[in-house]
Image (cartoon, rainbow, N blue to C red):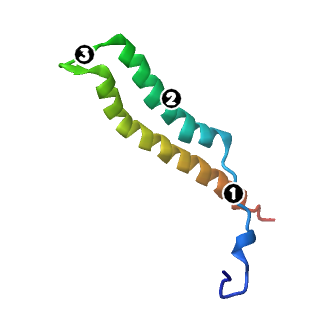
Amino acid sequence: MHDQDGRDDAMQAVPAISLPALAVGLGLPFCLVIGGGLALQAQRMVLFGVPLEIIWIFACFMLVPACLYTCSNLSSSAQYKADRKPVE
């Protein structure tokens, strides 16, 4: 579909995401949830009558959005720096 000014937006480049942002946004949450859950399940520890892996999963409810927020800030700051042109 075309805009009012006649530009075709279908051909615009998709901004690339940096490797640190990708690692923080996908790799770290995956390792937190899967790796942490598996590591704690093997130890069978209990805190206040609740298995530690259940507490860890509930902690990940806060940690994963924090990772995604950091990823969003890393990618937007990189895009902001790329969009700025030096004034001469």
- Quarter of the image for the C terminus: give it: bottom right
Q: Earlier in the sequence, mark 3 or mark 2?
A: 2
Answer whether labels 3 and 2 touch (C-beta < 8 Å): no
The kind of residue tagged 1 is Pro
Answer whether labels 1 and 3 touch (C-beta < 8 Å): no
The residues tagged by marks 2 and 1 sit, at their Cα atoms, a distance apart of 26 Å
Answer whether labels 2 and 1 touch (C-beta < 8 Å): no
Number of marks in picture: 3
As helix, strand or loop, the secondary structure at mark 1 comes to: loop
Q: Residue furthest left?
A: 49
As helix, strand or loop, the secondary structure at mark 2 comes to: helix
Q: Residue furthest right?
A: 88
The kind of residue tagged 2 is Cys
Q: Earlier in the sequence, mark 2 or mark 1?
A: 1
Q: Residue at x 71, y 72 (%)?
A: 10
Q: Nearer the viewer, residue 27 or 77?
A: 27
Indicate left or right for 53 with 68 as reference: left
Indicate left or right for 67 with 1 as reference: left
Indicate left or right for 62 with 79 as reference: left
Residue on which disc 2 sits: 31
| Vertical position of residue 64 compared to residue 46: above or below | below
The kind of residue tagged 3 is Val
- Quarter of the image for the N terminus: give it: bottom right
Residue on which disc 1 sits: 15
Residue on which disc 3 sits: 46
| Vertical position of residue 55 compared to residue 70: above or below | above
Q: Residue at x 59, y 54 (%)?
A: 76
The residues tagged by marks 3 and 2 sit, at their Cα atoms, a distance apart of 22 Å
Question: How far across and how far down the image is residue 24, in percent?
Answer: 56, 38
On the image, which quarter does residue 36 sit in?
top left
Choose mark 1 or mark 3, whichever is in front.
3
Question: How far across and how far down the image is residue 11, in percent?
Answer: 75, 70
